């Protein structure tokens, strides 16, 4: 793919991925052909900042896990009242990384 | 006691943030779970489990945070159950009890300050190794 397009993609969506993954994503995008570009443009990534806000407000009900697509963990959190509060505290610190990982998995599926 | 050493590679911004989070989380869980001493260990263990597929730097610091919480658990548990025995059982407050409580308060304070310091340094991408715990972590955590 054209490096200009790739750089544009990275500039727009770089914040949705882990910093150590960005270089890897760039190399991968350059190596693929142009036909994937239209699919890439339609991809919607989850914002880590939104998930941390949701985690702070609705973490004890597992809403943060539902939002990033971890339905199983969300139900687990919901039924245990956020793991008696412990899981909620852990997720305040984990959820941003988990969101970025989910975004990376989503991108991997398309590529 | 606390040494800043060179790590095998320079960690990225998000890696450093995650590693620092493991220490901050242990402190938040310790305060949030008072007076039960087991809460912080469960929380750190779960955080470690959540990051077991993470990069080497993140895993290393999660392991060090976990080990440091483990020794804290042993000391605090003894203090906790001794206090329960005094409150609800036949035990009375002795000089030994006061000395023990004083010791664990000092130990908790040192651990608290060390954890905050390590979180600050780790967040900036510096590799902080604690005395004993750092060596143990090196044995447990492999790249």
Image (tube, rainbow, N blue to C red):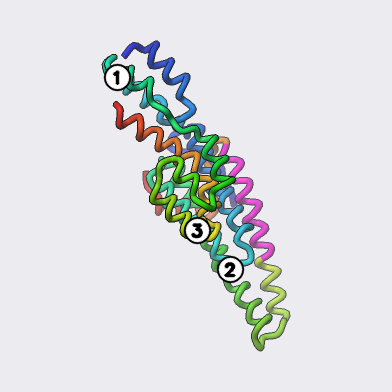
Badge 3 element:
helix
Badge 1 element:
helix
In space, the residues marked 1 and 2 are separated at their CA atoms by: 58 Å
Chain holding disc 2: B
Q: Report the residue at 30% width, 28% height from top.
A: A110
How crowded pointer 1 is (Cα within 10 Å; few <14, some 14-19, many 20+) is rated as few
How crowded pointer 3 is (Cα within 10 Å; few <14, some 14-19, many 20+) is rated as some
- Quick one: B66 or A82, which is closer to the camera? A82
Do residues under tags 3 and 1 come within 8 Å of each other at their CB atoms? no
Chain holding disc 1: A
> For the magenta stretch, what is the residue range?
B105-123
- The image shows residue A107 at horizontal and vertical percentages of 35, 29
Q: Let me know if residue B112 is in the magenta part.
A: yes
In space, the residues marked 2 and 3 are separated at their CA atoms by: 25 Å
- Quick one: B33 or A56, which is closer to the camera? A56
How crowded pointer 2 is (Cα within 10 Å; few <14, some 14-19, many 20+) is rated as some
- The image shows residue B5 at horizontal and vertical percentages of 52, 41
Q: Report the residue at 54% width, 49% height from top.
A: A59
- The image shows residue B49 at horizontal and vertical percentages of 42, 52
N-term-proximal mark, 3 vs 1:
1
Q: Which mark is residue B75?
A: 2
In space, the residues marked 3 and 1 are separated at their CA atoms by: 41 Å
Identify the main secondary structure in magenta. Answer: helix
Q: Report the residue at 38% width, 33% height from top.
A: A104
Question: Can residue B138 be seen?
Answer: no
């Amino acid at each position: 793919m054209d490096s200009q397009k790739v750089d544009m993609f990275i500039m727009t969506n770089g914040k949705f991925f882990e910093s150590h993954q960005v270089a890897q994503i760039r190399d991968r995008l350059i190596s693929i052909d142009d036909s994937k570009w239209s699919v890439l443009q339609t991809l919607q990534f989850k914002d880590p900042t939104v998930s941390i806000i949701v985690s702070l407000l609705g973490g004890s009900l597992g809403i943060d896990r539902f939002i990033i697509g971890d339905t199983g963990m969300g139900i687990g959190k919901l039924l245990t009242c956020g793991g008696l509060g412990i899981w909620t505290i852990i997720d305040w610190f984990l959820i941003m990384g988990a969101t970025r990982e989910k975004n990376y998995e989503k991108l991997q599926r398309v590529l | 006691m606390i040494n800043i050493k060179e790590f095998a590679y320079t960690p990225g911004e998000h890696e450093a943030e995650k590693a620092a989070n493991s220490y901050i989380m242990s402190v938040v869980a310790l305060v949030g779970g008072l007076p039960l001493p087991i809460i912080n260990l469960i929380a750190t263990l779960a955080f470690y489990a959540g990051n077991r597929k993470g990069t080497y730097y993140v895993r290393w610091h999660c392991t060090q945070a976990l080990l440091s919480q483990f020794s804290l658990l042993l000391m605090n548990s003894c203090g906790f159950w001794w206090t329960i025995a005094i409150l609800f059982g036949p035990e009375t407050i002795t000089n030994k009890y006061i000395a023990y409580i004083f010791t664990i308060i000092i130990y908790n304070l040192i651990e608290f300050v060390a954890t905050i310091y390590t979180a600050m340094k780790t967040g900036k991408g510096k590799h902080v190794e604690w005395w004993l715990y750092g060596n143990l972590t090196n044995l447990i955590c492999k790249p």
